[in-house]
Structure formats: C-alpha cells, structure tokens
Image (cartoon, rainbow, N blue to C red):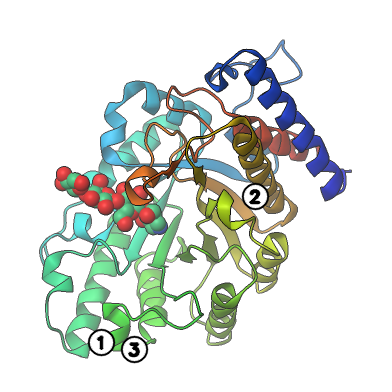
Amino acid sequence: MRASAPARRIRTRSAVVAAAAAAALLGSLASVPAAHADSDSDRRRPARTLHELARESGRYFGSAVDNPELADTEFAELLGTEFGQTTPGNGMKWYATEPERGVFDFTAGDEIVDYAKANGLKVRGHTLLWHSQLPAWLSEGTWTKAELRSILKNHITQVVKHYKGKVFAWDVANEIMNEDGTYRENIFYKVIGPGYIADALRWARAADPKVKLYLNDYNVEALGPKSDAYYTLIKQLKKDRVPIDGFGLQAHLALQYGFPGGYEENLRRFADLGVDVSITELDIRMQLPADEAKLAEQADWYGRVTEGCLEVRRCVGITLWGYTDRHSWIPDFFPGEGAALPWDENLRHKPAYDAIREELAEAAEDD
Ligand code: G3I
C-alpha cells in the first residue's frame, strides 16, 4: 500500500530540505549530486532513470526539446538516457510545417522524431492548431469560412498523416480558452466559429485512427473558470461523439502565484469524464536570484505535481518543458525570472530532481 498523500508529501519535504541543506553546507547549490549520481537505495544496480521509475507505474517521464538544442551533445545525451518521451518545442508548429500555403516542411519535426527513435523516446506531437507561431501567409491573410476550413483540414490531414505511427499523441488544439473561460478569439474562432474545435478533432482522427487526440492549455491546473470551460467542452464533445482522448495541462507554474488550488481534484474530474490527462509542459519558475528557500519550495511543488499525477490512474505521464536551466524559454519571456527546471545550467540536479525522483520511486515500489 502506498502511504497516504499527506504522509508521502511530508517525506518528500524532508528529503528536499535535507538535500538543500546538504548543498548549502557544501557552499553551493551547484554541488548537489551530479546528473548520474545514484540515489537509488540499491547501490549494486545502476540508478534507474526518472523514466524507468515512471514506467513501473505505467507512466512516461519526458522533456521537450527545441531543434537547436540537439547540437548540445551533453544535453542531448542526458535527454536520451534519462527520459522516455519528448515533445518538439517548436519543430511541429504551423510556421515550421507549412511555411507557405500547401508547401509542407517536416525537416525540424523529423529531426526530433529520428533522434527520439534512436534513443527510445516516444514523441508527443505539438501542435496542430494554435493562435501563436502561425505563418504570416495564414495570419495576415483574409479568408472566408470555407477557405479557412479547407486550409485547416488540409494542414491537419497532411501533418497527422506524415507523423502517423511516429507520434503517440497530438495536441490538436492549443490554448483555445481565455482566463475567464470564454473562447479565445483566434483566427479560427473568428472566421469559422467554435465548431472549428470539433472539426479539427474529427479531421485528426480521420488522418490517424490510433493517435491520442488532446486539447492542451496553461493555467488549467487549478479548479477555476478556465479549467471549468475545458471540463464543459470535453463533456460536450464526448456527448456529441467527437473524438477526444485527453486533456493536457501545461503546468507553467510560478512560485509567486501559489500552488494551483484543487490540482489533484481537477485532474481527477477530467479523468472521470473518460479522457486521459497529461502534464505536458511542466516548469516552475521563480523570481531571481534563486536561493535555498525558493529551491526547496520549488522542489516541494515538483513533488506535488508528480504525486498528483501518480494518484490519478488516467494521468499517463509528465513532460518537462526542457529539463535544464541551460535551455529554457522563461528568461526570454519573463525577465527577472528563471531557474525553473530540475537540472541547473551545468546539468546538475537541483532539489526538485530529488523530489520528483522520490515520488516516482515510492509509486514504483507500491505498484
Ligand atoms: O526562429 C527564430 C530565429 O530565426 C530567430 O533568429 C530567433 C531570434 O529571437 O527567434 C526564433 O524564433 C523563436 C522561436 O521560439 C524558435 O526558437 C521566437 O523568437 C520565440 O518567441 C519562440 O519561443 C517559443 C514560444 O513557444 C513561442 O510562443 C519557445 O521556444 C517555446 O518553448 C514556446 O513553447 C510554448 C508552447 O508551444 C505552448 N505553451 C507555452 C510554451 C511556452 O511559451
């Protein structure tokens, strides 16, 4: 039997505090155990990776990668050994895959699929439809409803067919809701209307009957108007027999905003609708400079996110949005914030790594 959630959380916290304290004693947080140091209790066997631990309870543990990062061989090697899943950070987005109308370019996505295959990682497709990073020909064009439906159908069909059998899931529609739970007025909503979501899911299913089809967004980890809107939408889609297999919670969290309230209950209510849930883009940023207390709090959060997923049977896996502070979107988008990942810039473990590991290891023992 697994310990009750609070009991396990207390154990995680104490481990985290111990790790942080040990690091402080050594004089630098950069001196927490190196990337492959063994923290498994059985030292006769090589340490199991985070993914190997996650796999024991039927989940994957992954990290996103942006194409240029593959040239960082130290980074790429650790990605290929520690993780069991990856998501292209940019390589499968519309601007990359259909840079001109009707002209498809799968170079960037293929590079990641090839890398993943060579290293035994499974791939999440990200993303077929998003308001951001659209090619100028599309976002700056003027379209009738019929034209845009045809463009969307062709894009989804071509991209999904190309990656058929190579990706296990697609973020079909990304970030389609506003914070207040109304539909985001992206180009597809404005021209086609809200029916574009069901259309997109049906076209994706027609192109690949087996791939898992997801809706994906940020700020949906807590119970609240935005996650409520997805709950209502997915319930309706299921009722209408529109193909929908999962809900992706990006989980771009920030210490200064507090841990998402009702996180586990929220995961569970989606699972109870009969869809999978995944943590798709996890990072936990903080206001810089990082210090021991913030890193300990961050570790606690990483442990809680992991634990919540492990508590919900249909939570199928966790993906970090990059695993190291060396390559992260945060400093460019949130000046003055960062240190968001479980590995530091030198690819050394932070307390967050130990917190994730402890949760995965406990679940692996129990299952
Ligand atoms: O490709 C150009 C390059 O030619 C140019 O030299 C360079 C100069 O800045 O910019 C490059 O484009 C950048 C692109 O990433 C590719 O690296 C853009 O400026 C940059 O804005 C873009 O950022 C991406 C961001 O999505 C765009 O919103 C991040 O890498 C990517 O991690 C991020 O990922 C999103 C998910 O898709 C959806 N959820 C949120 C998440 C974080 O924003």
Q: State the residue at coordinates (33%, 22%).
A: 73
The local secondary structure at tag 1 comes to: helix
The quarter in which the N terminus is drawn is top right
- Residue depth check, mark 1 versus mark 2: number of the one nearer the observer: 2
Which residue is nearer to you in this view: 178 or 91? 178
Q: Amino acid at mark 1?
A: Val
Quarter location, residue 31: top right
Q: Residues within 10 Å of mark 2 (few under 14, many from 20)?
A: many
Residue 115 place in picture, x, y as percent: 34, 34
For mark 1, what is the residue? 191
**Distance between mark 1 and mark 2 Cα atoms:** 37 Å
Q: Earlier in the sequence, mark 2 or mark 3?
A: 3
The yes-or-no answer for disc 3 within 8 Å of ligand 1 is no
| Image depth: mark 2 or mark 3 in front | 2
- The residue under the point 72% across, 65% down is 265
Nearer to me, 48 or 280: 280
**Which mark, by number, is residue 193?**
3
Does 144 appear above or below 69?
below
- What type is the residue that disc 2 sits on? Val
Instruction: Check if mark 2's residue and mark 3's residue have beta carbons within 8 Å.
Output: no
Q: Which mark is residue 114?
A: none
Q: Is residue 360 left or right of residue 316?
A: right
Whether the residues at callouts 3 and 1 have beta carbons within 8 Å, the answer is: yes
Indicate which disc, 1 or 2, sits on the residue closer to the N terminus.
Answer: 1
Q: Secondary structure at mark 2?
A: helix
x%, y% of residue 188? 29, 80
Tag shown at residue 305: 2
Asked whether disc 1 touches disc 2, contact meaning CB atoms under 8 Å apart, the reply is no
- Residue 26 is situated, as x and y percent measured from the top left of the image, at 62, 12
Q: Which quarter of the image is occupied by the C terminus?
A: top right
**Vertical order, 93 against 300 (above or below):** below
